[in-house]
Amino acid sequence: MRHRRKTAKLQRVASQRRALLANLTCSLIEHGRIRTTLAKAKALRPVAEKMVTLGKRGDLHARRQAIAFLRQKESVKTLFETVAPAAADRAGGYCRITKLGLRTSDAAPMAFIEFVDREEEAEEVAVDEVVADAAE
């Protein structure tokens, strides 16, 4: 029985699971939104939110903890300079999971995981594109 076992194993050993979650987190930080399976998105959300919390703390120890987990200095730099300040006034719940349906090849449930504060940036870009098209 799996009573009180919280970790989703994702059919991987611990080291591979940690590397997978670190790489997914780096991709999420870099792109703001990624498309993945629902199980991976659900496993990724607590990890990504902990990284944003480290970014909001902003001290040297938090930066070193983020580098130790993510292993990519550029992603940590983006996290501390862009993502964390955007979520500065939010008390939690930095990520959103949107279900997409089933993947055609193997019918795996797919989902988008994105930062909640990313939506404002996307709307501004969409408005700018509409205005630019109307001006032409």
Image (tube, rainbow, N blue to C red):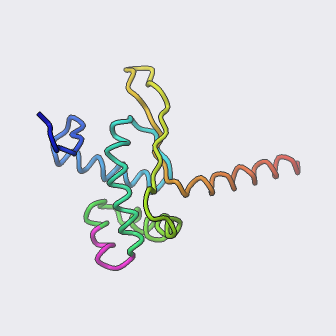
**Left or right side of 50 for 88:** right
Residue drawn at 82 percent across, 52 percent down: 131
The percent coordinates of residue 3 (x first, y second) are 14, 40
Q: Nearer the viewer, residue 7 or 128?
A: 7
* Residue 50 sits above or below residue 114 on the image: below
Can you name the residue that lies furthest to the left here? 1
The percent coordinates of residue 92 (x first, y second) are 43, 60
Instruction: Tell me which corner region of the image, top left, top right, bottom left or bottom right, holds residue 70.
Output: bottom left
Can you name the residue that lies furthest to the right here? 135
Specify the quadrant that holds the N terminus: top left
Can you name the residue that lies furthest to the front here? 3
Q: Nearer the viewer, residue 55 or 78?
A: 55
**Left or right side of 11 for 124:** right
* Residue 98 sits above or below residue 83 on the image: above
The percent coordinates of residue 66 (x first, y second) are 31, 66
Q: Which residues are magenta?
A: 58-65
